[in-house]
Structures are given as structure tokens and as C-alpha cells.
Amino acid sequence: MFSFIKYLFKDKFIQLFLISFLCLNSSLSATQKKCEDIFSNPYSFNKAMTKNLLLQAHQKQLFDFYKNSSFYNPNKVHEYSFKDMMKILKEYPELSKIPFREHIIHIKDVESKINYKNLEQFAISLNKSNSRVKNNLFKIKENLGWWKILLDYPKLDKESQKDKLKKQEHNLEFLEYLDTLIDKKSFENLNKPDYPTYEKSLLLYTILEKASDINLTQNRSIKRISQAMVDAIHIASFRNSNLTEVIKSKNLEILVNTLNLIQIKRDKLAKELGFKDFLDLQSLLEVEHATGLTKNQNIEDIIFSSEQLLESVNEIKDISKDSSVKILRVRPLSILEAPYRGCMGNDCSSREYFEEAFDPNFHYFTLTDEDNKSIGQVTVVLGTSKKEGKEIKTAFLDKIQNVPLNRILPIMEGIRLSLK
């Protein structure tokens, strides 16, 4: 018997279960569920928390369990927030949130039709390719051999390649040639880690354009130079866009937005260089695609197929027969959850405006799925206004954070019905 109990305490979940059970105050209010109902499984506990379950100051572990298992980003808050929250609620016991009604919405799950594993491999491969191209293009003196091939610089014959002195002379001649292409300041800027990639790419493009003109006059190949010109613009468009992390999030709307932003940046750079857009640049330079992309796997096709799936979101004909439909609850956050709204909105509100959560005029709504996991937060501020001399109640939309695009209209309709 003793060994069995010892085995139980080795299981972290059972430890949490038993500790949590003992931590619960036995004198729960009438609105709270009984301990045995709540802790029959974690699902029941988390659901109870979404139904305005109250906790005591000593039950931080319980709340942390709920926060870490149910909020989109549980780290978007200070570690001491629970203690601060309980201190405020103890000092002002009258604080509460209006228990607005929940509303159920149905969203078509298009993410299940996307092969995220293939997309993730594509993104990892593309990121590696971009890093390699960036290193070769920007760090010129460290990659002289690569640049010789790029510029189709005349090679040494086989006998001369065996002679170290001749090889050194050949490298010095190549460096002198590079000096005619790239001035000292440009060299320095290309090597600066803090010099913007955007500026580096435009600078590099002009250098390569000059090299291309020289090669044409000397009847040397410009094929690799043209490829590098396309790549210079392509890699600049990925700055501040972590495509791998976006794909890991498995949020199709965010993926489409990220890829569209990359396209917009590429087109903007191409226009600054006198082209209609990035595809026009590729076409005129006779380059099929940027390094790392292929004819069958490119940004344009991924956007097109993803947008087609998103367009099918509203084509829900029969909920009972459509297994791709998600059932979501549009619900208000409780007085305990409100200070942690930033964990659902993936924003700074919990850190920067923690006490605003207790303002009786500020109310927060989120989307909660069937597993009681919550994403997004919408802030609504209640107030009054005058219409034809009469005072009327009003609700102002303050902010929408981390709500997927195809869910914005449904959540807003759910909030409207809740406030009605």
C-alpha cells in the first residue's frame, strides 16, 4: 500500500491534483461548484474557471495551472500579478464584473486541411537558404571564392592554381577589381551587423547592376549576377518576419498575412528600383525564382491556396454533418481573468495596464474552444451618452487583440448579443 502511494506522488499530475484538492477552501460559496465536481478531471476545473469560479489568495498554484493550460500565451504577465490581484480584491471586495451572457459561434476549421509539417519544413529550408545567401552576399571578403564565381571572374589555369604565389596575386587582382565596383564606405556598410538589411539590399543591387553591365561589355555571363540581384531584394523582404514561428502557430490567417506582408515588401523594393513589382523584376532579369523557392513551392502559390481555404470559411451548410466546424464560446472574462487578458490577447495590457482590469467600466471578452482554451481579447468600455436630451447607455470598442481574421465578425456579433 505504501509503495502504491509513493508511486502516485511520483506522477506530477497526481501531485498537482492532490495539492490542489487540499488547497481548495472547503467553504465554497453557493455559486461555486463542489471540489469533487471540479477536480474529477482538469477539463472540469478549467471549465469551472471560465464560469466565474472564485479562488482564494493561497490558491495561486490552482490559478497558474489554469493559466498555463488554457491561455494563449501565459507568459504575457508579471510573476507577481496574482498576489497583487488578490491584494486589490481584498481591499475592495465590492469589485466585480457584470456576468454578461455567453454566446456560441460556429467557425469552419480550415487549419486541418493544411499540411503544416510540409510548410514548416519549407519555412526552415527557406530560412536556411536566406541566411546562406545573406552571408555570401554581404560578407564579400570572407567569401571571395563565391564572389569570383558570381561575377564570372576569369579563372586561373590548372598549372597556375598549383602555384601559391600566383593564387595570391590572382586574389589581389580580384580585390582590386572589387574596389572598382564597391567603394570603401559601401564595403563597411555591407559588413555592419546593425546596418539595415533593407538598405544593404538596395546598395548591393546597385553594385550587382554595375557588375552586370561590365560583364555584358566583356562578354562574360550575367546569369548568377541576375540571380543575386533577385535574391538581394527577396531576403530583404523577410526582415522581422519569422516564418517558421508563424507556421508553428498553425494559424492560417496569420500565415496568409505574413506571406502577404513579405510580398508587399518585395514589391515595394522592386518599385523603388523602377520595376512594376517583384515578379516584373524577376521576369526582366530572366530569373525563375529566388534561391530557396521552386516552381512548385513558392510564396504566391501558398497564399493562393490558403486564401481559397479561407474563402470557404462561411460555407457552413449543416453543422451536424461538417466535422471541420469548431464550436466556440464568446464569453466575458471574470474578475480573476481580466487582469490576465494580455495572456489571451498576446499583448502588453496585463503588464502595462494591470489595474485597468478592475475598472467597472472596462469589460473583456475572449473566444474559448471546446477544450476551454482561450485566444484573443476584445476590450469594451461601458459608458453613457445623450441622445435627444436623454441619457443612454453606450459601449465603446477599445481594442481587438490576437483574434484571427475569420473570427472578428463572429466575436463582435457575440459581444453585441451579450451586451444587448
Image: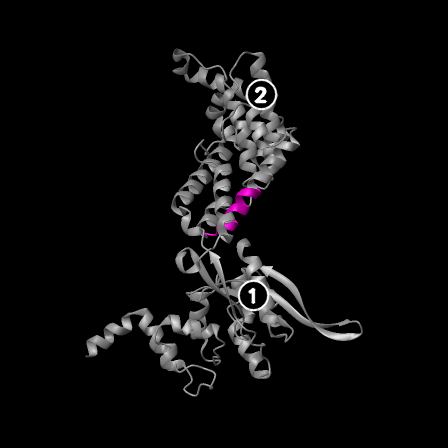
Residue 369, x across and y down, in percent: 45, 64
Q: Answer whether residue 381 is visible to the viewer in this image.
A: yes
Q: Is residue 92 left or right of residue 67?
A: right
Residue at position x 47%, y 36% in the image: 298
Q: Secondary structure at mark 2?
A: helix
Q: Secondary structure at mark 1?
A: helix
Residue 175, x across and y down, in percent: 54, 22
Q: Answer whether residue 197 is visible to the viewer in this image.
A: no
- Relative height, residue 16 to residue 313 (above, below): below
Report the residue that reaches farthest toward the bottom: 27
Report the front residue among 56 and 172: 56
Q: Amino acid at mark 2?
A: Ala
The numbered disc on residue 79 is none
Q: Is residue 326 left or right of residue 339?
A: left
Query: Disc 1 to disc 2, how far (Cα)?
Result: 60 Å
Decide whether residue 216 is among the magenta residues.
no
- Dot placed on the residue nearer the N-terminal end, 1 or 2: 2
Residue at position x 55%, y 41% in the image: 262
Q: Marks 2 and 1: in contact by CB < 8 Å?
A: no
Quadrant for the C terminus in the image: bottom right
Dot 2 alpha-carbon crowd within 10 angstroms: few under 14, some 14 to 19, many 20 or more: many
Residue position marked by numbered label 2 in the rendering: 211
Residue position marked by numbered label 1 in the rendering: 414
Report the front residue among 122 and 134: 122
- Relative height, residue 230 to residue 122 (above, below): above
Report the front residue among 330 and 147: 330
The residue stretch that appears in magenta: 250-261
Report the front residue among 210 and 382: 382
Predominant secondary structure, magenta span: helix
- Relative height, residue 162 to residue 340 (above, below): above
Q: Amino acid at mark 1?
A: Gly
Residue 416, x across and y down, in percent: 60, 67
